[in-house]
Amino acid sequence: MLRHEQVVPAQARDGAPLVVLLHGRGADRFDLLNLAPLLAPEAVVVTPQAPHSGTPWGYGPGWAWYRFLGGNVPEPESFEQSQQALAEFLAAVPDQLPVRTGPVVLGGFSQGGTMSVAYALRNPGAVPLALCLSGFLADHPTVRATPDTVRGTRFFWGHGTLDPSIPFSFGEQGRAALRAAGAELETGDYPIGHGISPDEARDVREWIARSLPASGGLA
């Protein structure tokens, strides 16, 4: 199973939401831990580490979900390997937690956001909520936004309008594809570069709280 960190609030009980946050290129499993109390203070949060070393691809000492080929194209083999590893992780991690978790929120930043949307589309209905922060819709043979693949998932897509790494236009393209397929989509635009602003974190927290069923809601 993928190496990971976890945050289990003292008040967490059976049925608490499980929020899985995927880091971006060149980061690690610790990178998004500080978001746990901001996005979902009463949820169990786990942060898996991508399976590929970023060093051979020039991404520094951290980790990567796939080798980036440019535009909105991940290298197919590394992307597929990570999708398979993520599927295995999501199936196994609930048994490693001290409470029996409820609805799953899968999301991430940059590569992590791209991975999250792709997973939701590849596995329709497997995750109730999918969160993309400054990612793109991957051009990969297994990733398609259609009425069948968006069914059963609510999406949030936040993006910085000044993003130099994954241009805002890529976010607009991904959002348009989801909308055309009939996805239930909420968006947020922020006057920032490649990062997550406090306003975006607040919007995500409110979206999660609104979107979960009453039995799994957050205070």
Image: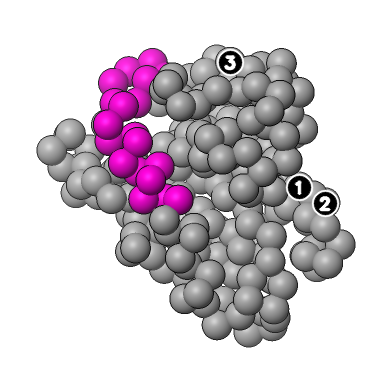
Residue at the image point whose x is 34% and y is 34% from the top: 79
Q: x, y percentage for residue 203?
A: 72, 45
Main SS type for the magenta part?
Answer: helix
Pointer 3 or 1: first along the chain = 3
* Label pair 1/2, CB-CB below 8 angstroms: yes
Residue at the image point whose x is 63% and y is 53% from the top: 105
Tell me the magenta residue range: 69-87
In the depicted structure, whether residue 200 falls above or below residue 3: above
* Label pair 3/1, CB-CB below 8 angstroms: no
Residue at the image point whose x is 13% and y is 38% from the top: 56
Q: Residue furthest left?
A: 56
Q: Along the horizontal axis of the image, is 168 left or right of 212?
A: left
Q: CA distance from mark 2 to mark 3?
A: 25 Å
The N terminus - image quarter: bottom left
User: Which residue is denoted by mark 2 in the rendering?
Assistant: 210
In the depicted structure, whether residue 81 falls above or below residue 1: above
Pointer 2 or 3: first along the chain = 3
Q: Secondary structure at mark 1?
A: helix
**Disc 3 crowd, CA 10 A, few/some/many (<14, 14-19, 20+):** few
User: Which residue is denoted by mark 3 in the rendering?
Assistant: 173
Front residue of this view, candidates 145 and 61: 145
Q: x, y percentage for residue 65?
A: 34, 41
